[in-house]
Amino acid sequence: MKFGYFDDAKREYVITTPKTPLPWINYLGSDSFFSLISNTCGGYSFYKDAKLLRLTRYRYNDCPVDMNGKYFYIKDGNTIWNPGWQPVKTELDEYECRHGIGYSRFHGAKNGVSADVTTFVPTNDNCEVSRILIKNNSSETKNLQLFSYVEWCLWNADDDMKNYQRNLSTGEVEIVDSTIFHKTEYRERRNHYAISSVNARTDGFDTSRDAFMGAYWKSAANPEAVEKGELTGSVASGWCPIAAHQINLSLAPGEEKSYIFVLGYIENPEEEKWESYGIINKKRAWDMLSKYKTDEQFLAAFEALKAYWDELLSKYTVKSDNDKVNRMVNIWNQYQCMVTFNMSRSASYFETGIGRGMGFRDSCQDLLGFVHLIPDRARERIIDIASTQFEDGSAYHQYQPLTKKGNADIGSGFNDDPLWLIAGTSAYIRETGDTSILNEIVPYDNDMSKATTLMEHLKRSLDYIINHKGPHNLPLIGRADWNDCLNLNCFSAVPGESFQTFGPSEGPVAESVFIGGMFVKYGEEYAQLAELLGDSAEADRARKEVKIMTEAVEKDGWDGKWFVRAYDAYSHKIGSDECDEGKIFIEPQGFCVMAGIGKDNGKALQALDSVKEKLDSDYGIMILQPAYTRYHLELGEISSYPPGYKENAGIFCHNNPWVSIAETVMGRGDRAFEIYRKTCPAYTEEFSEIHFTEPYVYCQMVGGRDAKFHGQGKNSWLTGTAAWTFVNISQYILGIYPTHKGLQIDPCVPSDFGDFEIVRKFREGTYNIKVKTNGSQKGVKKLTVDGKVCVGNIVPYEKGKKIYNIEVEM
Ligand code: GLC
Ligand code: GLC
């Protein structure tokens, strides 16, 4: 069952009922100002950092869910309704939400009146702009009232929901004409305030939540001032400041009126904070508002957003017989890659934005699917991430986007982290050819007195693994590896202890075969970077270490039919046939084969066949089997989840593409695509009532076979799945892979996929690629570039060349 449909021409998902299984959200903003917005107008906004600079308040763990958003109320006689249905929930005669690329639109109609809201964050501004068009479709004159409502957050979203003894006394606002200024804490150490404004004369306002809603048992669903049809003109002093506007309007039959609302963030230099004693300097606010006064200005800003995305999405486009693939590749998968790049795992409807900042490993992986879109931002991100690394090559697990400093309370010691920095840097250089980044001087732990070249950072990443090996010559796992929940040194027995920080982060025994596979893959990529810098001795050294690691993985990391997952602190195997539970794990199968381990001796194929036999399900590949049915002290968080959920035998979408890529390495296009298809949103859309999460983006986890809700998704949007599925479909299945020498073309598709065309912008060139598959799954038989036959399957990069016309025969 579906709750909407894709409108590919407009690049929108159209939701046709407000009653979706969960709030289905969108993200607005691509640089500094961001909003989350649900299909019923719930959500919130922040500037740069969802924890530290939150503009509007959201209620967590609320019931009904998704409470607080930016709401419009229309009062038509005794009927009060919202174009997005919430919060009043008056049944609408018409409802539609269109989530587009960086914008959302809502259409609601009731009793002959329609309202169309378009909301977006302009490309170069720190605000959210919403236009509401109200139209009288009836044959009588309508006298209506329009109200707007947002509730301010007192900036630090974490403190905001805990520290009432202070916060209920600090709220302050100013009001000038149609603009409400939220200036809590501006009197002291803040130099920023927020505004809510409309481009029309208003007939009333409220800035105190209590005045707007009435006493404390009222809510946004039945605000007293709206019911009375008259805002009270309250000026907030402490308690809960809001911004509400009232506009009375009369519409003749067929008449339509337009109002533009702006929610903005303004920052003043310290010396320009005040206009006069206690009165904030509003110049920058007026400048911002002057840009969104008219419909022409609104439409121009909206067109600029569209042009921005046209350009970005033109970097990789495919035309194939498969609409679902086209839709994901050309629109939604790339869009989600941008969102995960911006948010890491900070702010979604499953991540509160107050817990986690930017993940070290997460952001490095997000880069893989984003780097082709805006390489300069990827470059900046690599430097930011590397700047939080420790001198010994290890890393803080997360950092705050505002301060860009490592987050000490989240801890460190995840031993896969260092290698992801190599992965991200290598992807950036393969995309751009910009080796100058390797010579950038980058601090350790944000301390410039300890700084070296980025290349030296990468060397320390590599050496960290080389210098931290256990009894089987495999990498020590530390606190955990990619699987945050495999906490082999933790031994937590007390409720509530964080598995992410409790206990020693190191142990001399517990080892990870997965990190071994990663080392083999990224050790080789590191060696290539050393070669680019002309350091062949370093490249040789790295390759020698890769060989040693490969041998260790093949020897003690092989269980007979698949790769072992790890060794615990007692040196017992995890993910082995000898275990009673958790006999086989997905991660090492995907990563080791991707790295080429066992490719020539049958182990790789055997491992992939075991995955299919033991881990596959209708909704994707489970992370492990059999599920852990009891808590294992020696394994940590993984066994804390009930069977079938999350890391305990859930379908972790993130590592499904690893296995799919591994299948392409082995040339099995049918199977690679089968894996791709099972978790792909354009396919899961068909059973949205089971899958639950948005049908246009990936989620982190789907309930596994052991779960009560097998097939049900959770944790949508912010997941490394976005980047890895894009890498999989664009670079391995469709097969356009950037190398240091040029674009490699090596598709691995299902035998019935048919011919396809790709336009790929790579460095200064546009590559028009036509592939004739001839029913083959893999293997390029002939490659011509501008009519000339090319040896091998890499199109050599030619500096300055603008157009490459390429024909491929498989
Ligand atoms: C979450 C984390 C990611 C981790 C994964 C597996 O998605 O964001 O860093 O690798 O879980 O535990
Ligand atoms: C929990 C989750 C895991 C996530 C981690 C982040 O361990 O199960 O997916 O990566 O928390 O803190």
Image (cartoon, helix red, strand yellow):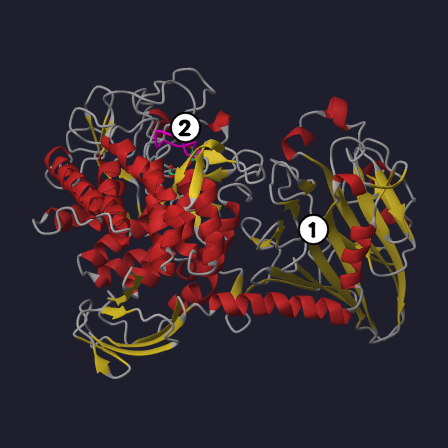
The residue carrying mark 1 is 86
In percent of the image, x 79 and y 40: which residue is there?
271
Q: Nearer the viewer, mark 1 or mark 2?
A: 2
**Does 396 lie within the magenta span?**
yes
The earlier-in-sequence mark between 1 and 2 is 1
In percent of the image, x 26 and y 70: which residue is there?
795
Does residue 461 lie above or below 141 as drawn? above
Amino acid type for the residue under numbered disc 2: Ser
Q: Residue furthest bottom?
A: 787
**Main secondary structure of the magenta stretch:** loop
Q: What stretch is highlighted in magenta?
A: 389-397
Quarter of the image where one finds residue 666: bottom left
Q: Which mark is residue 412?
A: 2
Please say whether residue 692 is visible from this viewpoint. no
Q: Residue 309 location, x and y as percent?
A: 54, 66
SS for callout 2: loop
Q: Distance between the residues labelled 1 and 2?
A: 42 Å
Q: Residue furthest top?
A: 494
Q: Does the residue labelled 2 lie within 8 Å of ligand 2?
A: no
Q: How crowded is mark 2: few (under 14 residues within 10 Å), some or many (20 or more)?
A: many
Q: Residue 690 location, x and y as percent?
A: 44, 51
Q: Residue 416 location, x and y as percent?
A: 32, 36
SS for callout 1: loop
Quarter of the image where one finds residue 396: top left
Q: Is disc 1 in contact with disc 2, using a CB cutoff of under 8 Å?
A: no
In percent of the image, x 16 and y 74: which residue is there?
781
Q: Residue 15 location, x and y as percent?
A: 57, 61
Does residue 403 lie above or below 149 as drawn? above
Amino acid type for the residue under numbered disc 1: Gln
